Image (cartoon, coloured by chain):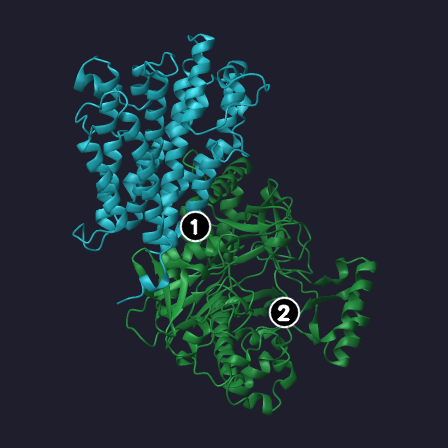
Amino acid sequence: MLARMAANFYWLGRYAERTENTARLLEYQLTRLVDTDADELALGWRVVYRALSQSPPHAPADVDEAEAFLIADAYTLTGGLVEDTTNPASMISCWGMARENAREIRPRLPLPVWVCLNQGFLWLQETEFADAWGEGPAALVSQAIDRLRLLAGVVDANMARDDAWRFLEIGRYVERLQQQVVLLDMWDRIARPDGDGLVLSWVDLLRVCGAFEPYRRDRSLTLRRSSVLGFLLRNPEVSRSVRYATDRIGSALRGIDPAGGRPPLAPPHRMVLRMAAALELDPGGAEPPPDGASAEVFESLTRDSRTLHSLIQTSYVDYPVAAGLPS
Amino acid sequence: MSSVKFVDHGYADPDPAISAGSGPFRHYELDSAFHDELFHEDGTPRARARRLGAALSRIPPEDLERLQDGVYRRFVHEGITFTVLGVEDVSEQIIPIDCVPRLITAEEWDHIERGLKQRLTALNLFLHDVYHDGKSLRDGIVPLDLVLGCPQYRVEMRGMKVPHDVYVAVCGTDIVRAGDTFAVLEDNLRVPSGVSYMLACRTAMKWAFPYLYRAYGVREVADYPERLYSTIASLSLTADTPRMAVLTPGRYNSAYYEHAFLAGEMGVDLVEGRDLVVHDATLFARTAAGLRRIDVLYRRIDDDFLDPVAFREDSVLGAAGLFHAYRAGNLVLANAPGTGVADDKALYAYVPRLIRYFLDEEPILANVDTHLCREPDGLAYTLDNLAELVVKEVGGSGGYGMLVGPHATKAERKAFAEHLRNDPANYISQPVLPLSRAGCFVDGRLEPRHVDLRPFVLQGREEQHVVPGGLCRVALRKGSLVVNSSQGGGCKDLWILRE
């Protein structure tokens, strides 16, 4: 397929995943509004904003980040991440970018996929945020999540498992990989005993990642930090674990590689296998390493996932002409 | 869409009792100056329209409204749009679609089809002649300076062998019914657009009026993408199964939806200039797995932008060296560069002569009377009768750069006269045509509106095919004669009847 189309499928996957990630984090926070005290809510907003690499809201110069979230109201904080078209990370912006990518690949995109994506975007664009808020703070993002999951289902049901699908998968899971690493790292930094000294629930982390039920089945209700992080890093069956993302990326890259994964491997494929090995061979094994080591794991995962993105670009999209000539 | 109940009464027998000006057609005002597609001058329905009229008379206006809305939403959700470039932003707009089909009888269509084939054959012969022997120019059939002075004349094409001598593989010809006859208004031989709207209208109408559609026995147009593919593929010199692509200027182009639609339907890549590389006089597309050769390019960008080396050097829409690959015989372009010389509005006036000269036949389809302002008599006549004429730029399109005399103010006519005097060769004039009117559903009423018709003709290596349908454009503003979508026009489905 055309390199530009591959890039657009990749970015479509990334933006759709990014939109859902934002919606999921917001849903977690907004459902807590009714029964959580102000300090905890402010902490929740810090988590959401940091996980999305967003700056804290504007606040007087003499207040720190924690206080800034205490001052700001939920309506404004949510609006900035949902409907603010000047914020490139807002849901409307990301959905719009996904739609623009989809427009570029319309000849390769099944019509039901386009219609579902387009209808969702038009729905969000036409929804009055203030009215939607009146139906309940979490109502809008919950509906958005439903629409995004419908889109995932329509994609799943309508797309052939060809290179277009593979680039879409790679985009989706590279985004998930990067977002999950940021979320786990940030959660761990805040929640660990030598961290900010604030209380963050490991159950909440599992819930945000849609992993509470599988965790409970797999490890009962033993909610130790090491156990939860280990589960979210290395479990191969939980869709929001880091291991799951690297496996899916590796599988898609194997399909794209004309040699079918036999050496010599393409650079992105080598990188993702290296990441999988680093996760597997970490001294912590099934359990995460003792305190102090996991920061290095997160650091290397962050660095490697960025490198992986660059390698995908240079290997399949922006390669030199001479390298692409038929032999 | 699914919530709209079927209101189609196409199974009902034709009802001779319906008439213009009464019942559901009470707002339908006939005007003897214009041919009406639904009714005779006395208000009785034409034979072909009886079933349609009966069906429309049985559908409550609110149901028609729902159908119209359903069709509109279908276009919105499927993104059947055209792009409008504003001063500050780019917006996507839906082309308004009217839910009342226009009907053309088999006999009428036979006449149009034969005329279109004849016309395209003559124009392809003329283009070959222009770029080779120039016999028609030397024999004075067409003035030499008209051709050489045309901005669309490509000297780079002189003496070049075009695959199978097919310069124009895809043609869209604008036809109007004025009085009781059909006449050609203009030929579009470069990158004619609108075929995707024809197909979208048809899909929508089949959904809206399934029984009526079946009862009428309408000729099918759905195979257009296959025919387009086989037509263009047949021009290939290098491969039995050529690797084809559609070249688009990109998603900000007004016809981008159509480019994407056709590429998708044909199962070929939709490429932009940035996807293309020319190496060793061969065109390649950048794929995720390296460079892949392209044998045939259905290009939807103008000549000027094809290749910055050969044509406009500031173009970023084409690919450097593309024309070199074409000249080397390693690439087929459809349509060929330089075809614009034959769809210039001034040259249009000479097409009947060209048909007689190249084919030794009388033109089947008439031309509209055209005055060439490049000629002193033509200029004088135009200036003297500006208030009664339509004046157009010879290279203009989309309804821009024209003056509709009867609708222009005195000041506008005066300003336009200045343009005419300063650059007479750039203009032609024609009488205001009494475009026929077809029934439309506008603002909850059935009323007549002016329409034209753009059928599409495909010319392959051996076969010629006229699509039994076309883009029927409609001037939705009451009294307006301008059907262009950029000027408030919409479209409607065109039903060519089998019998």
Mark 1: secondary structure: helix
Which of discs 1 and 2 lies nearer the camera? The answer is: 1
Residue named by callout 2: B395
Percent x, y of residue A5: 37, 52
* Chain letter, green in picture: B
Residue lying at 35% horizontally and 52% vertically, measured from the top left:
A314
Residue lying at 45% horizontally and 57% vertically, measured from the top left:
B259
Residue lying at 32% horizontally and 55% vertically, measured from the top left:
B288
Percent x, y of residue A243: 23, 33
User: Label 1, label 2: how many angstroms apart (C-alpha)?
Assistant: 30 Å
Residue named by callout 1: A104
Percent x, y of residue B197: 48, 54
Tell me the crowding category of disc 2: few under 14, some 14 to 19, or many 20 or more residues within 10 angstroms, Cα based.
Answer: some
Q: In the image, is B479 to the left or to the right of B281?
A: right
Q: Is residue B43 visible?
A: no
Which tint was used for chain A? cyan
Do circles 1 and 2 both sit on a common chain? no
- Picture quarter containing residue A185? top left
**Res A204 label:** none
